Every structure is written in structure tokens, then in C-alpha cells.
Image (tube, rainbow, N blue to C red):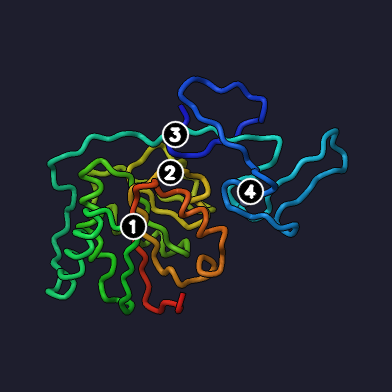
Amino acid sequence: MKSKGQLHLVPINCEVLEGWQTFPTFEKEQCWRCGSDTNKEIIQVTHGVSEPYYYCRSCLAVGSANTCQKYIWQPPLQRKGTDVNLLEWEGCLTPEQSVISNHLKEAVEKGCERYFIWAVTGAGKTEILYETIAFFLQNGGQVAFISPRRAACIDVSKRLKKVFSRTQQVTLHQTSEAVYKDEQLVIATAPQMWRFYCAFDLIIIDEVDAFPYVSSLQLQYGTKRALKKTGSSVLLSATPTKT
Ligand SMILES: [Zn+2]
């Protein structure tokens, strides 16, 4: 059974079962999942093949996508909400942290598309997010937490496992062997977002100013595509760029 909300690559002439939608890997020589469109990134293969084809070098990290393939996709799982408080955290926020936590939650409840939190390292940015994450999870939403580095990803994953122990979670990065199986909470490095399409109600992007995310249009493109059209993103930074 293939997971939902995720893009699965299949040969272009593969028959598609009912309920699945298909998308091209390339549109007008632009990679559909990462947006690359230059000669440097889109490579044409002509040698040793009966039909020339293109592949994208930019998003190779999640598997080669070429013009002999297409994506198949199903909308993400529709989950029922729950009245159970899924947040099991015994700590408490300072009055200042509470102000931001409440403001963020109110903003996303009203459908805020992008929310930016600028605070120094150690200010408790992750804890400030707990109530908002809980709000989405309790309403049946899909949540992704993106960290720029694998180590940061693993660290966040441990913390979220503790405080949301009743929620199914998966941690995805280049060397993890985990496979996404419709878990409600995904902790991942940014390239992993290329695997998804209109999948998340909330995407949190930690250290939004960090390399490679800050300078990669492809990673930013992929993250935007992984978010549902009605979704919210929360950006975190201690040292934001002007942009
Ligand atoms: Zn690509």
C-alpha cells in the first residue's frame, strides 16, 4: 500500500489504478518537484538509449526523476479530530513565551499563511510551538517539522516523541532507513519535502536562514509544494537574513 500525500515515481506508461492522480516529472523542461529549469540542473541523456530523456540533478537526493517516468499521488489521509489533549509536556512557558505561543496559535487558527519567529538560540522556540502543533494534531492535521541539519532533526525528533508520544511520527533524512507510512507528524531535512505534494497542514521550518535552505530555490520550492493550499508555515530563526 503506497502512502498518501507522497509522490511515487512509476514508469510513464504504467497503468494507474482508480483513485490515483498522475503528474508529469517535467513540465516545459522544468522539474515538477523542485522547479529546476537550467541546463546545469536538467541533464539530457542521449548516449546508449533509444529515446533521449532528461533527468533532474538538483533533487537527485530523493531519487532520480526523469522524463520516462511520472508521479502518482493520492490526497493525504483524512483524519478525525480528537478531544484528547495530545500534548504531554510538564514544563511551562514564561509569560513572554506564552504571549508568542498564544499569538501564533490564534494566527494559524485564523488561517495565517506564514508566521515568523525571530528569537535567540535557547529562547525556547520549539516549546513555543507545542500548543500550535497540538492544535493541528488534535484537529486531524498533518504536520512537518523541517530542520536544516540531520543532527538537529534527530534532536527535535527525540523532543517531539516525548511530548507527543500518542502521535505517530517518522524522522526522514538522507541516511535514515525510515519510510513514510502516513504518519501524522514528520520530522525531516528539507530535501525530504520533495517527496510530498499538498500533504501538510502545518510546516515548521527551523533555522530558515541556514545553509542550504536559505540559498536554495529548489528547497524552498519543494517545501511550498509540500504544504496544502490552505496550510500554514512557521519560520524560525535566530539570525535572519534581510529577505
Ligand atoms: Zn528536480
Q: Quick one: label 2 or label 3, which is nearer the N terminus?
A: 3
Q: Report how far apart the C-alphas of labels 2 and 3 lie in the structure.
A: 13 Å
Picture layout, residue 76 above or below residue 123: above
Q: Report how far apart the C-alphas of labels 1 and 4 lie in the structure.
A: 25 Å
Residue type of the residue flagged with mark 3: Ser
Q: Which residue is mark 4?
A: 31
Q: Report how far apart the C-alphas of labels 4 and 3 lie in the structure.
A: 22 Å
Ligand 1 within 8 A of label 2's CB?
A: no
Picture layout, residue 38 above or below residue 47: below
Ligand 1 within 8 A of label 4's CB?
A: yes
From the top left corner, tell me how far across and down residue 204 is, in percent. 36, 59
Q: Quick one: label 4 or label 2, which is nearer the N terminus?
A: 4
Residue at the spot 56% in from the left edge and 62% down from the top edge: 217
- Tell me the element at label 1: loop
Q: Quadrant of residue 5?
A: top left
Residue type of the residue flagged with mark 4: Cys
Residue at the spot 31% in from the left edge and 70% down from the top edge: 117
Q: Which mark is residue 3?
A: 3
Q: Report how far apart the C-alphas of labels 3 and 1 lie in the structure.
A: 26 Å
Q: Kindly report which numbered mark, 1 or 4, lies closer to the viewer in this rendering.
A: 1
User: Local crowd at mark 4 within 10 Å, few (<14), some, or many (≥20)?
Assistant: many
Q: Quick one: label 3 or label 1, which is nearer the N terminus?
A: 3
Q: Which mark is residue 113?
A: 1
From the top left corner, tell me how far across and down residue 205 is, in percent. 40, 62
